[in-house]
Amino acid sequence: MSEIKEKFYEKLNPQERVRLAISALTRCDYEEGRRLTRSCQKFTYSMVDREYVDRINAISWVKMHFSYTCVYYYGKAELFEVLLITKKLLTEFAPPEYTSHKPSISDLESALTDQLSKLKSLFQGFDQFCESKGLNSKNLIEWFEVENACAKIYEYISRANIECSSEYTETFKNDFEAIWMEAAP
């Protein structure tokens, strides 16, 4: 490379260098593209350990997914609980024409049980995931929570006499694992 071209390359700012590199690559002038890259100013950087940053990022994404899923299923459980209470009140006090409509009390009880089972399975899947990563799930549940919502939900479902679904537990655990692998390969 001639000394004039070399001096020219050294004076390019990043924006100019990118424009010239794109132009060279568009012309299939790969040698010019390599020269532009080789002559680019070199910097040495210092940063926090990348694996640490990736893991904190992954934990944040997993926790966010857990919290949103927790609130979602809790909201559905609350909805079915309100519908169930309303249906029972209507059955007891309203005329039959208001109470004969679907869903039935048993349908609502079944839907409520299903949502609570999913919630309990979510917590169990989260516990299993955290254990596999050497993390304390209880600490993570309390971490950056709005008014400890998930911790309160956990207390609520712990009192419920509901079984976990091993299928849902495994699904939730796998969801957390997939998020982890995406964020911290």
Image (cartoon, rainbow, N blue to C red):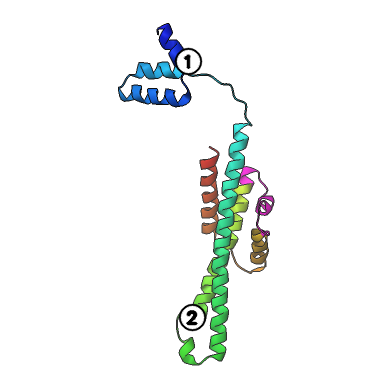
Res. 118 visible in picture: no
User: Residue 10 has which mark?
Assistant: 1
89 above or below 51? below
Residue 173 versus residue 181: which sits nearer the camera? Answer: 181
Residue at horizontal 35 percent and vertical 19 percent from the top:
30
Tell me the amino acid under the disc marked 2.
Answer: Ser
5 above or below 16? above
- Image quarter for residue 70? bottom right
Sequence-wise first label, 2 or 1: 1
Q: Which residues are magenta?
A: 131-148
Position of the N terminus by quadrant: top left
78 above or below 164? below
Q: Where does the image place residue 124, in percent across and percent down from the top left?
A: 61, 56
Residue 42 lies left or right of residue 8; in this view the side is right
Q: Where does the image place residue 177, in percent across and percent down from the top left?
A: 54, 46
Looking at the image, which residue sits at the far bottom?
Answer: 95
Q: Where does the image place residue 182, in percent across and percent down from the top left?
A: 51, 42
Separation of residues labelled 2 and 1 (CA atoms): 78 Å
Q: Nearer the viewer, mark 2 or mark 1?
A: 1
Res. 28 visible in picture: yes
Q: Is residue 88 magenta?
A: no
**What is the tally of numbered marks visible in this picture?**
2
Q: Residues within 10 Å of mark 1 (few under 14, many from 20)?
A: few
Secondary element at tag 1: helix
Residue at horizontal 44 percent and vertical 15 percent from the top:
9
Secondary element at tag 2: loop
Residue at which label 2 appears: 104
Residue 184 versus residue 14: which sits nearer the camera? Answer: 14
Tell me the amino acid under the disc marked 1.
Answer: Glu
